[in-house]
Amino acid sequence: MSVLRPLLSLSVLCLVACQSAAPPTSQAQSEQTQSRFSAPDEANLAAIRGALLAPAELPHLMWRQSLRITAQGKSHQLEAIVQNDGKEFFVLGLGPGGMKLFLVAHTEQGLSSRIFVSQRMSLSPEYLLFDIQRALFWPPPVACGTGAHRGFSVADRCDGPRTISRQVSDGPPGSPQSSSHLEITYPHGFTFNGPPDALSLRHAARGYQIDITQLQSHVLP
């Protein structure tokens, strides 16, 4: 999710940041780490992949953001890069000193991800990319109320033309994840035209909150 140079790390970055940095893993170690994601996330990945917007459907941009991630009573400051050129939408998570944490990319061939640290992740990078799209690229329901997007429920609250908050489900109706929601707050409102200067993502069931501040924004050809 060129698109963001910034946003990025939900629970994934949470657990990474909560522990001391480890050296980059080999490709084999990376694949082993990816196989240890939680079962609910793995079970829901098929629905997530079906709901993702393709790079060709997204604006061409590059954003860089500062993230303050709070989980388990601790807060950590990180950065993220998200970029889309119409063919590839990727998110790169950066730790202290610009250390690469993970990379997740979405192309017409599908999703791929790589983890550069050895700690176990609590959230798949694919799920993080999905959160970015839900917060920043899914259009508001008609008349800014309750609706659905690609089978997932969306409820927006607005002040005139600006969206103030959004609640979006983790899964389509009938799935175990349908009753779990991501809560998104846009302190200064959001018109889905360029990045908001700030937003917060809160997931009570997963126990994390991410406060995002926009640092840079570029439109790509």
Image (tube, rainbow, N blue to C red):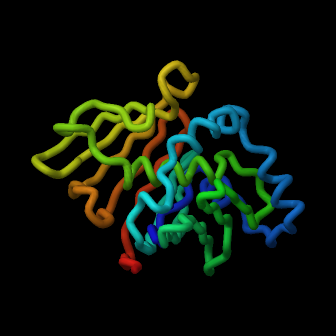
Quadrant in the rendering for residue 158:
top left
Residue 10's spot in the image, x, y percent? 55, 52
In the image, residue 189 above or below residue 45: below
Identity of the residue furthest to the top in this view: 174
**171 horizontally vs 198: left or right:** right
Q: Nearer the viewer, residue 86 or 218?
A: 86
Residue 28's spot in the image, x, y percent? 89, 61
**72 horizontally vs 65: left or right:** right
Which residue is at 16% across, 38% downward?
A: 143
In the image, residue 81 above or below residue 158: below
Quadrant in the rendering for residue 31:
bottom right
**60 horizontally vs 165: left or right:** right
Quadrant in the rendering for residue 41:
top right
Which residue is at 39% across, 40% downward?
A: 183
Which residue is at 71% across, 50% downward?
A: 121
Residue 162's spot in the image, x, y percent? 18, 51
